[in-house]
Amino acid sequence: LTGDAAGVVLLAALLYGCAIISFTYCASFFFKNPSSAQSIMLMVYIFTGAILLIASIIMSAIQSTKHVNEQLRYVYRLVPTYSFGEIIVNLMTRDTVLIWGAEQSVTSYKLVGKPFIYLACESVVYFCILLLIEYVLATPSLYIALCRIGAVEDEPEEEDQDIVAERERLQAP
């Protein structure tokens, strides 16, 4: 993807970077262990960026699943990896008349418009969600109210006999 598509690929990579950073940060709150989070998120990105994209292409080629796939693409695009992969695949096939009906310009809305819009919106929306999560976690009263966590009271401890004797000695006149 060089020449006239290079600028589109660069913009796609920048938007993908902005969207995926916030998306991954938001997803990190679902995990307790960083190494398992990394492994699971890697699998999610492989699944959505490669396998789901291939499945979508196949569904588009089959007449009976074409309409369903068109509707599902709106859901698929909620994951930045899918949108980025869709841009790259569309750019690689832009001169295939069988797919597009006619050769497409690299900046054609039909070719890259929707995935670009999704990536741009995801960059903002996932970042706002991230800020909201961080704000809730940084505000204990809000966290307790939203998560319905009651205040934990410490059980009264039995005082050691030495402490009781020392307190009585200090309080004596």
Image (tube, helix red, strand yellow):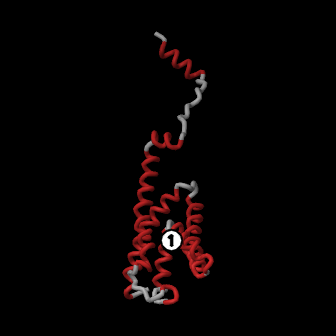
Q: Residue type at mark 1? A: Thr
Q: To which residue does mark 1 refer?
A: 81
Q: Is residue 73 above or below residue 171?
A: below
Outermost residue, top side: 173
User: Which of the 4 image quarters holds residue 68?
Assistant: bottom right
**What residue is at 57 percent from the left and 72 percent from the top?**
46
x, y (%) of residue 118? 44, 68
Q: Nearer the viewer, residue 120 or 37?
A: 120
Q: Nearer the viewer, residue 157 or 56?
A: 56
User: Which of the 4 image quarters holds residue 40?
Assistant: bottom right
Instruction: Decide: few, some or many residues near mark 1? Use Cα within 10 Å; few <14, some 14-19, many ≥20.
Output: many
x, y (%) of residue 35? 58, 61
**What residue is at 58 percent from the left and 26 percent from the top?**
156
User: Which of the 4 image quarters holds residue 8?
Assistant: bottom left
**What residue is at 40 percent from the left and 81 percent from the top?**
108
> How many labels, in total?
1
Q: Nearer the viewer, residue 109 or 133?
A: 109
The quadrant of the picture occupied by the N terminus is bottom left
Q: Is residue 157 above or below residue 82?
A: above
- At numbered mark 1, what does the secondary structure look like: helix, strand or loop? helix
**What residue is at 57 percent from the left and 56 percent from the top?**
31
x, y (%) of residue 134? 44, 51
